[in-house]
Amino acid sequence: MSDQKFILAGVMGHPVAHSRSPVIHNHWIAQYKLRGSYVLLPVEGGNLGDALKGLKALGFAGCNVTIPHKVEAMKAMDWLHPVAKQMGAINTIVVQPDGALHGFNNDGFGYIQSIKDAKPDWQANAGPITVLGAGGAARAMVLSLINEGATQIRLINRTKSKAEALAHEFGSAVKVVDWSERNQALANIAMLVNTTNQGMHGQPELEIDLTDLPKSALVSDAIYIPLETPLLAQARTRGNTTVNGLGMLLNQARPAFNAWFGVLPEITPELHKAIAATF
Ligand code: NAP
């Protein structure tokens, strides 16, 4: 029997049963012939503090944190990465040898990497970017676009006050546009980003008219169920390059896996196949 240490990690949230993270991490554990397991950790709100304290005692190398704990879990961290502080949320915890909990947010990294994977010559400052939505995903995606050099972001949300709050926090690169003007806000842009849940499985499709969208614009959607949302299908049909949300999910997992298992894993066609088999 190997004397290699058995490493545990998981995803803490509620609900978590739908999470694709176990498929991703357990695929890598098998691919790199490591000893370990990545498990679902369904934890309800009131138990979050106790559950996080238990990570060290249970021998976990760390865990991902998902809805509804991404903000609340920050309070239990002994140290926060500057990007996590800036985002006001964490998605990854790494347990240190002394039991200290370190919090990270790799969502923005995952998003930018997914865009670069799809379009290696992509530049954040190539032109205006229209972002739809102002929830948790928008927060990570808009901040990472700004950190990457974006200077003209048109932020549009059904509830305008939420977009205004983000714009206030993120500074002059972000200008708020009314939800009713979203079609016109597609003119002259280099990129359209959907961060709303519209178009996700079980939700109505996003109501938008792409007539004014330049054919050269990149269209990205945070959604990965389905892999091609009606927005992406429509954009692809008219000739736009499209990027779905799966690349963001896969790329945010890489640095977390590296921190827990000591291997920076690759995103292979086999991994894509394993994920596709779960849809
Ligand atoms: P969230 O915080 O709940 O935000 C939801 C957003 O959708 C808000 O901007 C909300 O607008 C908007 N919305 C909801 N119903 C709408 C409607 N009928 N018309 C127009 N806008 C509507 O959710 P989230 O965490 O940001 O997640 C958003 C999407 O991103 C989900 O589909 C999620 O699966 C996906 N996501 C993907 C990844 C990835 O790794 N690929 C990571 C995170 C999230 P209001 O403010 O007006 O309610």
Image: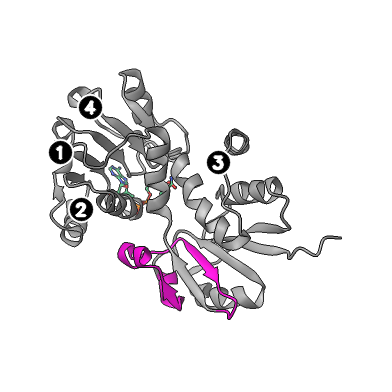
- Of the two numbered discs 2 and 3 on the same chain, state the one appearing first in sequence: 2
Say whether marks 4 and 3 touch (CB < 8 Å).
no
Residue mark closest to the camera, 2 vs 1: 2
Q: Which residue is mark 3?
A: 267
- Of the two numbered discs 3 and 1 on the same chain, state the one appearing first in sequence: 1
Outermost residue on the top side: it is 238
Residue mark closest to the camera, 2 vs 3: 3
Q: Which residue is mark 1?
A: 180
- Residue 150 shows in this picture: yes
Q: Which residue is mark 2?
A: 163
At a point 67% along the width and 72% down the height, the residue shown is 59
Residue 213 in the image: state x and y as whole percent: 21, 27
Could you classify mark 2 by the number of other residues whose Cα lies within 10 Å: few (under 14), some (14-19), or many (20 or more)? many
Residue 97 in which image quadrant? bottom right
Could you classify mark 1 by the number of other residues whose Cα lies within 10 Å: few (under 14), some (14-19), or many (20 or more)? few
Q: CA distance from mark 2 to mark 3?
A: 33 Å
At a point 34% along the width and 68% down the height, the residue shown is 85
Up the image or down, 184 lies above or below 79; here it is above
Name the element at disc 4: loop
